[in-house]
Image (spheres, rainbow, N blue to C red):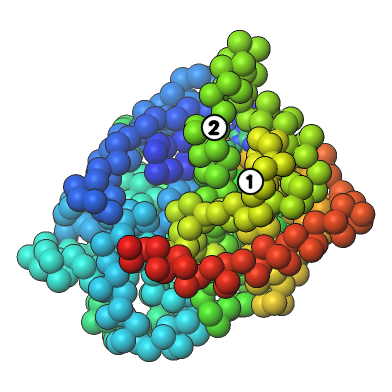
Amino acid sequence: MEYLLGIDLGTSGAKTVLFDTVGVPIASHTAAYPLRQPRNGWAEQDPHDWWRAVQETVGAVLAESGADPSSIRGVGLSGQMHGLVLLDAQGHVLRDAILWCDGRTQAQCDEITDAVGRERLLSITANPSLPGFTAGKILWVREHESERYERCRHILLPKDYIRYKLTGEFATEVSDASGMNLLDVRGRRWSGEILSALDIDPALLGRLYESCEVTGAVTHAAAEATGLSPGTVVVGGAGDNAAAAVGTGVVDTGKAFTTLGTSGVIFAHADQVAIDPRGRVHTFCSAVPGAWTVMSCTLAAGLSLQWFRNNFCAAETEAAANLGLDPYELMTAQAERSPIGANRLVYLPYLMGERSPLLDSDARGAFIGLSAIHTKPDLIRAVLEGVVYAQRQCLDVFREMGVDVRDMAACGGGARSPLWRQMLADVYGCGVKTAASAEGPALGAAILAGVGAGVYGSVAQGCAAAVRSGGVQAPDKTRSAAYEPYYRLFCELYPALRGSFRTLAGL
Ligand code: ADP
């Protein structure tokens, strides 16, 4: 028996899964770690916590499976993107990592835009300068903690710190590096122009690989610490969504997945670099060599339904507890009693402001068209539909950019609902299948490990061997046509209300 190991370094915890070479999970273990918020809007984690969680979870899957460590052909890493890890000359952590969701760097992002030029930055890194991305965090540390910055010899992304602990190598790979604002995304190399404009020494950055390339091997010290076999290869791996794309088989033209988690993500494969000149969606290098990906993020997808449940569905929550059901199932069953268009009610899901495609932190949620005839089923249906329209608006940006999407997979908690999946299919106008594996990013990382270790000939072959998907829900022409005028109206509402949202924010 041969195995592949996927390690996914999430924001709430590390998940390690041991797979066989046809993608069946043999053992899985998760260990949580804390998120620190030293100030409002800041978000940090201690890289030592990540390493402890990796040691614990690797040890647990080895113990649970009884697998011989030498039968593990390779290790793949995936994880939260954009975070900043700083190490000194001895490889010691200089400060807590500043995470993707940390919002302290708007001033540094403005500096970056001024130093490089907005259009130049977009054409090189394929993205505008964003507070989530790594470059602004580097400048922040240099400006606010200069003494620490002077001692810094290595800058790493979160999962690449685990690579360093496993292999002793300072390295990264193109998919994750795409979220730093420092990579020439078209050329898949560090941008000398940007590094020099920002006065960042290129020697600080890790060596750059493709996601399926071998970046090193488990050292004796790491073998001792984890139970892995010394010499086991560790491949580049990928950022969380890029790894999930591999784990759901989104590795060819026309394929994409939609995640209805707390936030909503669409992640599509692209054969060529496609950049939105308005920066409404992100473009990254794919984990597939020679390909790219386009990604949108809406902030309150599943969160919208969760908000409605928490505030207006105490009865459903209690009934569900008595019946041993999930309250969301009772809520979506009610929504099925309301027709398409929710009796002329439209919901805007901007509970947290909006990222893609509006880029407006002042945007706010709304029910438009409320009347005395409306009932709770209409409101729930409107919430489900509004979340889907917001995804469709992102998909329309992809289509505008020439990214072809014909084959969609659905993931995340919201994809459990057949009604929500069918809405996606009808409103997108393409088939929507369920991802069979709940292990998306860890499976993707393991497949990349299999490619690097020579188990599979390519990422596509690895996906063919190891990824299974559930049934497909096809779009229905009549329903698609019925949704269309509501979708058009949805698109008109934000521009009409933008000024009011701004006024509201100023009150
Ligand atoms: P996260 O992004 O935080 O990891 P999940 O992927 O678990 O979250 O998604 C959580 C969301 O999924 C919830 O907020 C809810 O909107 C939605 N959800 C979970 N279960 C169901 C269900 N059975 N039907 C509809 N929506 C659901």
Residue matched to label 2: 312
Q: Which one is in front, 346 or 309? A: 346
In this rendering, is residue 335 above or below 152? above
At label 1, the amino acid type is Val
Which badge, 1 or 2, comes first in the chain's sequence?
A: 2
Q: Which one is in front, 11 or 385? A: 385
Q: Is residue 261 visible?
A: no
Q: Secondary structure beneath disc 2?
A: helix
Q: Residue furthest top?
A: 322
Residue matched to label 1: 383
At label 2, the amino acid type is Phe
Residues at circles 1 and 2 in contact by the CB criterion of under 8 Å: no
Q: Secondary structure beneath disc 1?
A: helix
| Label ID, residue 394 | none
Disc 2 crowd rating (10 Å Cα; few below 14, some 14-19, many 20+) is few
Quadrant containing ligand 1 reads: top right
Task: Give the residue drawn at x 59%, y 56%.
Answer: 348
